[in-house]
Image: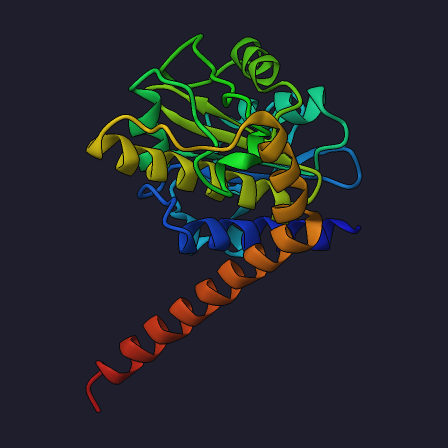
Amino acid sequence: MTPAQARRLAVEASHALAASGQGDLVWGHAAVRDPDGRGIWIKAPGWGLEEVRDDRLQLVSHEAEVLIGDGSAHKECHIHLEVLRARPEVHCSVHTHAMSAIAFAALGVPLLPLSHEAALFEGEDVPRFRETGGLVSSPELGEKLATALGEAPAALMPKHGLVAAGHTTAAAVMYAVLLDSACALQLRAQAAGRAIIHSDATEARAKRAQCWPDGQLEAGYRYLVRKAATTATTADAGTSSSRPA
């Protein structure tokens, strides 16, 4: 992979997250490991996920310094720097303020394998980062978050959002999307009563292998990329048609 390809993936991942509904005004970000080992490619602060373009990216060093791009680094760039430092196999990491994930984390109950989405965790509860509900704005907090995430595909950050990490951009984005969807489904079930029907650990483990191999993660991710492109095209067409002749 070249730096140009990593930049393209950082833009693409941002758009896919926006298309999935995980945008929060200008907050939240996806980071792609720089193939030359210089740090991470991430959107510059102040832009929404759907607004990210190549010229709105930064290359942020392992010391949280902006090597390429405008402005200062995201205060929470340490999330990505420390997750990628702890897990050399990870190519991309995601942090968003996904609403269902935040709402579910506030309940303090285990995530149950009610659905294909929750089977991602093989019948185990999703990890949680409880050190702070504030910004992960230091290497020390980033390291503690990486420890809480461990080898899991994603983790909840109660009072804050979620973090996800994958060996491909598609995997990292889809892990974030699937976690938020699993949280939304359990919230709906619990609104009607106590959830009692779900997979056991053996079935959940089998479902993860069956439902979420790389090919399926890629297929879901490609759908979100197409959806983002369609939304952008429609918005551009609407803007053009509204201009006076």
- Residue 21 placement, left or right of 65: left
Q: Nearer the viewer, residue 106 or 83?
A: 106
- Residue 128 at x, y percent in the picture: 47, 17
Quarter occupied by residue 241: bottom left
Is residue 33 something that shows in the picture? yes
At x 66%, y 46%, the residue is 210
* Residue 100 percent coordinates (x, y): 32, 35
Where residue 111 appears, x then y in whole percent? 43, 25
Give the residue at x 29% y 35%.
189
Viewer-side residue, 224 vs 194: 194
Q: Residue at x 56, y 10 (%)?
A: 144
Residue closer to the observer: 227 or 210: 210
Coloring basis for residues: rainbow
Q: Name the foreground residue: 50 vs 166.
A: 166
Against 179, residue 222 (above or below) is below
189 shown above or below 11: above
Q: Is residue 188 left or right of residue 77?
A: left
**Location of residue 201 by image quarter:** top right
Q: Residue furthest bottom?
A: 245
Q: Position of residue 154 (x, y in %)?
A: 55, 29
- Does 163 appear above or below 141? below
Where, quadrant-wise, is the C terminus in this rendering?
A: bottom left
Q: Residue at x 70, y 19 (%)?
A: 86
Q: Is residue 94 visible in the rendered structure shown here?
A: no
